[in-house]
Amino acid sequence: MATVGRNIAAPLLFLNLVMYFIVLGFASWCLNRYINGQTHHLSFGGNSATGFFLTFAILAAVIGIVSKFAGGNHIRAWRNDSLAAAGSSSLVAWAVTVLAFGKTISTYVFVYLDKSLCILGIEKNCDKAQKR
């Protein structure tokens, strides 16, 4: 029964590792363009959430790649002590990924949505929203 779990986990672990490398490459490229000030094109929106999101995305990708290496070690060893290391590192990677997503969503909801509602005349506290 243990070999079934290993056989299923190994391809999924490799697929997740490839996706983290894609996220790392894309976020690094975007951060480079953001630092160089090449964000004037409409398809690349440079707002106040961009810097935070890219920083946390790179951090989450690096931690995710390291956790996939710990997961590969666990698949190779298949013991309880390697499971604890792989599980804890993957939990940290997931938490940082959620942090990146949550920071971006909170910036959009609390800053841009309030301003959009003020423009439409729906928001009651437009003075507070305009000051942000």
Image (cartoon, rainbow, N blue to C red):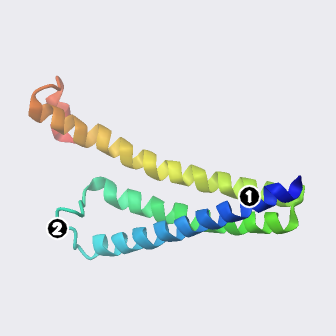
Residue occupied by mark 2: 40
Can residue 67 be seen by looking at this rendering? no
Q: Quadrant of residue 5?
A: bottom right
- Can residue 87 be seen? yes
Q: What element carries label 2?
A: loop
* Residue behind mark 1: 8
In this rendering, would 105 be left or right of 6?
left
Tally of marks: 2
Dot 2, crowdedness within 10 Å: few (<14), some or many (≥20)? few
The local crowd at label 1, few if under 14, some if 14 to 19, many if 20 or more residues have their Cα within 10 Å, is few
Residue 58: percent from left, percent from top: 48, 66
Residue found at x 55% / y 54%: 96
Give the secondary structure at mark 1: helix
Q: Is residue 87 left or right of residue 80?
A: left
Q: Earlier in the sequence, mark 1 or mark 2?
A: 1
Hey, which quadrant is residue 132 in on the image? top left
Q: Which of 48 and 3 is in front in this view?
A: 3
The amino acid sitting under disc 1 is Ile
